[in-house]
Image (cartoon, rainbow, N blue to C red):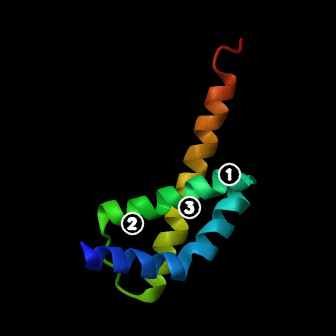
Amino acid sequence: MEREQKRLEEYFKKYCPLVFRVAFAEVKSHADAEDVLQETFIKLLRYHPVFESEEHEKAWMIRTTINLAKDLLKSKWQQSTVGMP
């Protein structure tokens, strides 16, 4: 468990600024970007992806962030249009 925590801390230090910038560029909201950031790292913890290289690792972080941001925007749009004629 301690090893997993250390691994996550290393990923967080390495990718937090990048993930936040990508998320913010997509959602245009500080709070929503923080939510996407958190979800990205939860996915990393949950799925334990194996990366072939540092480039693969970075690409996974970026693609996951973008996908989660788009999912968030879709859900917000659907919530705001529910009940509209």
Q: CA distance from mark 3 to mark 2?
A: 11 Å
Between label 2 and label 1, give the one nearer the viewer: 1
Q: Amino acid at mark 3?
A: Leu
Closer to the N terminus: mark 3 or mark 2?
Answer: 3
| Residue at 60% from the left image edge and 50% from the top image edge | 70
Closer to the N terminus: mark 1 or mark 3?
Answer: 1
Residue on which disc 1 sits: 31
Quick check: marks 1 and 3 in contact, CB under 8 Å?
Answer: no
| Residue at 58% from the left image edge and 36% from the top image edge | 75
Residue on which disc 3 sits: 37
Closer to the N terminus: mark 2 or mark 1?
Answer: 1
Q: CA distance from mark 2 to mark 1?
A: 20 Å
Give coordinates of residue 7: x percent, y percent: 36, 79
The numbered mark at residue 16 is none
Q: Residues within 10 Å of mark 2 (few under 14, many from 20)?
A: some
Residue on which disc 2 sits: 44
- Position of 44 with respect to 24 (left or right) is left
Quadrant the C terminus occupies? top right
Q: Amino acid at mark 1?
A: Ala
